[in-house]
Image (cartoon, grey):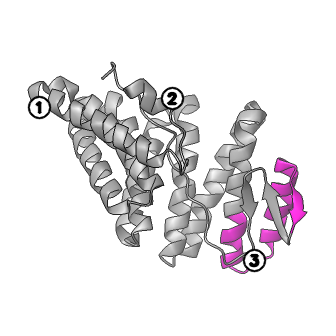
């Protein structure tokens, strides 16, 4: 079942209910296993994380929030005994928690969650920069959006600038892999600069266009799936990857 659930596409309206139902069955199975043997708590946390993503795709934010909160509780407990093994997954779940809380309008809690995700990823990055710098940049982008929403534009700008700097460095090493993310961060930077009414937002917009190769469309820059909107628009949020595979089939 897990392999089938992983193959179902995300953001598919036709398959969303099927994907959510299948992921719920997997989660129920993993819960039974974890109740019998705590060694399966890791698998349960992964299934809960996937369930949260599937429920979020359907706009069922309260249920998605309950699932990701349970996943975080498990991963936080696991990270206490094995931090190196479980803190990366905890940070990913905190990133998802922030998104779900934001979709429910619970901005202060959303900010708290993404701040913790950034803190963990910043702590992990020096030891394994290749593994964790992309994740840190993603969480910094989301942190920027939450700070902006809370009326803290200068802090939002600082987070956005840091994300751009990381992704610019990554794009120099692997352009094809990281230029789309760099364009997204430049998009966000232009928005944050616009909130501060600085003239630098146009420069960021021009760089986005240069990075992405996009064309001007209806006074916006369409970026291969991302659109640079005019200042005053909300910044984008970024989720952590797709589904998480379990350790064995269900």
Residue positioned 82% across, 62% down in the render: 221
Secondary structure state at the residue bearing disc 1? helix
Earlier-in-chain disc, 3 versus 1: 1
Name the image quarter holding residue 196: bottom right
Residue 191: within the magenta?
yes
Q: In 3D space, how far apart are the residues under numbered discs 3 and 2 (Cα atoms)?
A: 36 Å
Label 1 packing within 10 angstroms: few (<14), some (14-19), many (20+): few
**Horizontal and vertical percent for residue 92?**
42, 43
Residue positioned 72% across, 75% down in the render: 231
Residue 127: within the magenta?
no
Q: Mark 3 points at which residue?
A: 198
Q: Name the residue under label 2.
A: 128
Is 132 above or below relative to 117? above
Q: In 3D space, how far apart are the residues under numbered discs 2 and 1 (Cα atoms)?
A: 34 Å
**Horizontal and vertical percent for residue 169?**
71, 40
Label 3 packing within 10 angstroms: few (<14), some (14-19), many (20+): few
Is 247 above or below relative to 182? above
- Start and end of the magenta stretch? 189-217
Q: Mark 1 points at which residue?
A: 35
Residue positioned 53% across, 48% down in the render: 14
């Amino acid at each position: 079942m897990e392999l089938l659930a992983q193959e179902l596409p995300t953001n598919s309206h036709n398959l969303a209910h099927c994907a959510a139902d299948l992921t719920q069955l997997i989660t129920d199975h993993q819960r039974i296993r974890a109740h019998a043997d705590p060694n399966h708590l890791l698998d349960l946390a992964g299934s809960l994380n996937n369930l949260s993503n599937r429920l979020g795709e359907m706009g069922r934010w309260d249920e998605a929030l309950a699932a990701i909160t349970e996943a975080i509780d498990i991963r936080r407990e696991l990270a206490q005994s094995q931090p190196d093994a479980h803190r990366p997954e905890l940070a990913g779940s905190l990133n998802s928690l922030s998104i779900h809380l934001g979709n429910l309008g619970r901005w202060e809690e959303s900010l708290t969650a993404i701040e913790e995700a950034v803190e963990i990823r910043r702590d992990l990055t020096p030891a394994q920069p290749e593994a964790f710098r992309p994740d840190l940049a993603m969480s910094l982008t989301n942190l920027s959006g939450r700070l902006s929403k809370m009326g803290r534009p200068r802090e939002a700008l600082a987070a956005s600038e840091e994300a751009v700097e990381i992704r610019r460095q990554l794009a120099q090493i692997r352009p094809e892999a990281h230029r789309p993310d760099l364009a997204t961060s430049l998009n966000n930077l232009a928005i944050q600069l616009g909130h501060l009414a600085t003239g630098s937002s146009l420069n960021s917009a021009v760089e986005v266009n240069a990075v992405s190769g996009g064309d001007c469309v209806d006074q916006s820059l369409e970026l291969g799936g991302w659109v640079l909107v005019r200042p005053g628009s909300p910044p984008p949020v970024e989720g952590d990857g797709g589904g998480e595979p379990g350790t064995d089939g269900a």
